[in-house]
């Protein structure tokens, strides 16, 4: 990636190469997932649709939190 994305919202849920705004190191973000506002709605919908799609729905609708692996600061959140 030519230019690192600005801190704040990141529009991806994949680990992203960037410069950490906190420790100024070139990093690849560590992505963890947290429950977003739509996660519980998706879980309820999955109960009606069928069990087979629960993992997909949960992963697709969770917020992806990007964390610096060097200093541990949260550098961005991909909000769903
Ligand atoms: Zn850092």
Image (spheres, grey):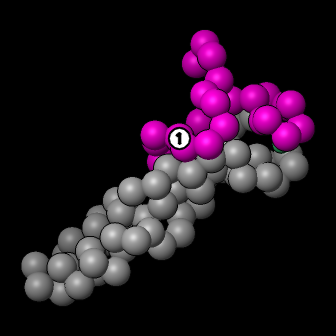
- The residue furthest left is 49
Residue 36, relative to residue 22: is it above or below? below
Residue 47, relative to residue 76: is it above or below? below
**63 left or right, relative to 30:** left
Q: Residue at x 61, y 13 (%)?
A: 2
Q: Residue at x 76, y 47 (%)?
A: 68
Mark 1 vs ligand 1: CB under 8 Å?
A: no
Which secondary structure, mark 1?
loop
- Quarter residue 25 falls in: top right
Image quarter where ligand 1 lies: top right
Q: Nearer the viewer, residue 14 or 37?
A: 37
Q: Is residue 14 visible?
A: no
**70 left or right, relative to 78:** right
Q: Position of residue 28 (x, y in %)?
A: 69, 37
Q: Position of residue 48 (x, y in %)?
A: 11, 85
User: Where's the N terminus, which quadrant?
Assistant: top right
Residue 37, relative to residue 50: is it above or below? above
Specify the segment rendered in magenta.
Answer: 1-26
- Main SS of residues in magenta: loop
**53 left or right, relative to 23:** left
Q: Label 1: how many residues lie within 10 Å, few (<14), some (14-19) or many (20+)? A: some
Q: Position of residue 78 (x, y in %)?
A: 50, 50
Is 80 a magenta residue? no
Q: Residue at x 36, y 63 (%)?
A: 61
Q: Is residue 30 visible?
A: yes
Is 21 a magenta residue? yes
- Can you identify the residue that label 1 sits on? 10
User: Where's the C terminus, which quadrant?
Assistant: bottom left
Q: Residue at x 53, y 69 (%)?
A: 34
Q: Position of residue 37 (x, y in %)?
A: 40, 71
- The residue furthest top is 2
């Amino acid at each position: 990636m030519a230019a690192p994305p600005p801190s704040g919202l990141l529009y991806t849920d994949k680990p992203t190469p960037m410069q950490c705004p906190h420790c100024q190191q070139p990093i690849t973000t560590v992505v963890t997932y947290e429950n977003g506002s739509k996660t519980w709605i998706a879980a309820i919908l999955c109960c009606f649709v069928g069990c087979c799609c629960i993992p997909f729905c949960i992963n697709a609708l969770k917020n992806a939190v990007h964390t610096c692996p060097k200093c541990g600061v949260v550098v961005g959140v991909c909000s769903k």
